[in-house]
Image (tube, grey):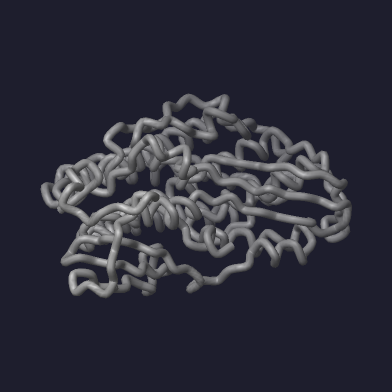
Amino acid sequence: MVNWKEDRSKFPEKNPDGTNKIDLNSHKFVKIWQGPQHPGVTGNMALELTVQGDEIMESKTHVGYLHRGFEKLMERRRYIQCFPICIRVCVPEPDSNEYCLAAAAEELGGIEVPEKAKWLRTLALEMARLANYLQWTGGQCGSLGMGTVGQWTMYLRDYVLDRFEELTGGRVYHMYIIPGGVRSNVPDGFEKRMNEVLDEIETVMNKDIYNMMFNNAVFKTRTVGVGYIDPKIMEDYGVTGPNARAGGLIKDVRKDYPYLIYDKLDFEVAHGKDSDIYTRAMVRRNDLLTSVSLIRQILAKMPKDREIMAKMPNVLHWKIPKGQTYARIEASRGEFGYFMTSDGSAYPRRIVVRGPSYTHAMSLFEKMLINANIADVAATMVSLHTCPPEIER
């Protein structure tokens, strides 16, 4: 098994850009394809791999197998009509799209959101982060044939979706965060039921999943030292989120550029230093537990007032003044943002989604796979925690 830390002298001669010099007419090299097959990121993209034995000499990413064109679709709809579209940019974490779209429109439109709505928005974002990390944890283990962990995390995620249904009326797509605030307040008894779910998640993550995953000799063998990302290239490749923090580059929008009420909450940013699959998994596990703590703090400190929506014009005829802005957050995958331009009409002139998956799953991933073993492709891909619609947006 080969990774970036090992001697490369036995591999083919290099091109000036660092890629391998490959003579495809040679019998030594064979082209194979991985994907597309659903579900997950390993199925929504196709990888064209040139291999020598079981080692990858070259990797090319092929996309276009998924729904796409979200940005153009939103430019042809009124602002409020964009919300059923934007949430599909990342299905496991739709609330990050809701917030970025709403925050950009509010800044350009001069809308001040009530304080209670800021707390509820933060609650929804951390619940979404929690649900997404639970799904990812099962996916990472599934890429290595450890299906039991996936069964545990999916039942835990279903509990979180129960609370989403209670709060927003929807389990997967919520459309809860809209311009001016949020659609509903927390129902009676929500804090108690949410804390019961958090207790269950914390117990299973710290005991069963920790032992089955992080103390597992097979998992360690397949992940320690594998899928290494050189911290020196992270800035050049736009690496953010847990992928960056696992290599010692501590970047978190919640701390660096505080938004909503994160400056009123007590938390530390999870990070590591070894920059391999195992470390990225541990950073996400710790980040998941941070979300548990943040949700508890939000529920305990949330203001008692009932105002959750600013006074808004008729949203079907809302014309936002000319201007442009960029709204960003720390999604579970890293820095996520919306660049919005208004021409003064009832429709956005331009919307551009900045999703971390674009760089993580394409240019970075292609570089990471050079001289990797084909058995490590799926685990490495999942370890980057990408959302393909962010690429085909």
**Image side of residue 108 versus residue 258, left or right:** right
Q: Is residue 69 above or below residue 93?
A: below
**Image side of residue 127 versus residue 143, left or right:** right
Q: Residue 6 versus residue 33: which sits nearer the camera? A: 6
Figure quadrant of the C terminus: bottom right
In terms of image quadrants, where is residue 361?
Answer: bottom left
Question: Which residue sits at x=44%, y=54%?
Answer: 363
Question: Which residue sits at x=27%, y=56%?
Answer: 379
Image x and y of residue 228, in percent? 28, 44
How many discs appear? 0
Image x and y of residue 246, in percent? 34, 37
Image x and y of residue 294, in percent? 47, 34
Question: Which residue sits at x=42%, y=33%?
Answer: 293
Image x and y of residue 356, in percent? 50, 49
**Image side of residue 199 versus residue 6, left or right:** right
* Residue 390 appears in the picture as rendered: yes
Q: Residue 384 versus residue 372: which sits nearer the camera? A: 372
Q: Residue 197 versus residue 39: which sits nearer the camera? A: 39
